[in-house]
Amino acid sequence: MTLPLFPLNTVLFPGGRLPLRIFETRYIDMVRRCLRTDSGFGVCMIREGAEVGQAAEVQPVGTLAMIADWEGRPDGLLGITARGERRFRILRTWVQPDQLLMGEVEPMDEPAATPLPEEFLSLATLAERILTELGEPYASLPREPDNAVWVGARLAELLPVDHTVKQRMLETDDPLARLFMLRDAMLNHF
């Protein structure tokens, strides 16, 4: 599958939401194409480079994003909310003349819903509280507080954890390993 890739200094997990302000022509054009064809784009964390200017090098795993909502903003920028669908592995990338990064990707299997172990119940409570306090687009997300996959993904995207750790969590197929990584990162950060 071929996707336009959006290099960012953040990670999007399946089931998550990511508000974005679009101002570069290459990404405005990409969003228009996605809206016109009801297609998605890849959100990938930057490995080297910057969000603005020349195309950045990205991490090998990203998330297919669909546009859940969009609006013209008062500042003249385009505002969108991206919805994470599923992870993918990048097979190869190339840069178009307009500096839009493209990728040939293969979808990754998503972990099955996994019961949340009792030792992580406090993380489920934290995830629900954060989503409620953040308001939209997060407050209306479907909730699965008894699912280790959901709890780990929501907290990994929302907590101020180092982005390289978030990327490792995205790449991890084991939802319980993701929760242990998250707990360790929280203990080191807070």
Image (cartoon, rainbow, N blue to C red):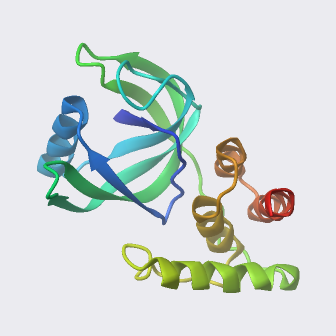
Left or right: 108 as drawn, with respect to 30: right
70, 87: nearer the viewer: 70
Q: Is residue 58 visible?
A: yes
Based on the displayed image, in which of its 4 quarters is residue 29 positioned? top left
Which of the pair 79/76 is nearer the observer?
Answer: 76
Q: Residue furthest front?
A: 75
Q: Residue at x 24, y 33 (%)?
A: 24
Q: Quadrant of the N terminus?
A: top left
Observer-nearest of 148 and 82: 82
Mark yes or no: residue 146 visible. Answer: no
Q: Quadrant of residue 114?
A: bottom right
Location of the C terminus by quadrant is bottom right
Please indicate whether residue 95 sits to the left or right of residue 69 in the image.
right
Residue sitting at the far top: 97
- Above/below status of 45 relative to 101: below
| 18 lies above or below 76 | below
| Residue drawn at x 16%, y 57% as measured from the top left | 73
The location of residue 87, given as percent across then percent down, is 53, 49
> Is 14 situated above or below 138?
above
Vertical comparison of 108 with 179: above or below = above
Q: Residue at x 64, y 50 (%)?
A: 170
On screen, residue 11 versus residue 72, left or right, reads right
**Number of on-image labels:** 0
Residue 36 in the image, given as x and y percentages of width and height:
11, 48
Give the x, y percent position of residue 108. Answer: 57, 46
Residue at image location 50% in from the left, 82% down from the top:
133
Residue 83 image offset from top left, x and y in percent: 38, 61
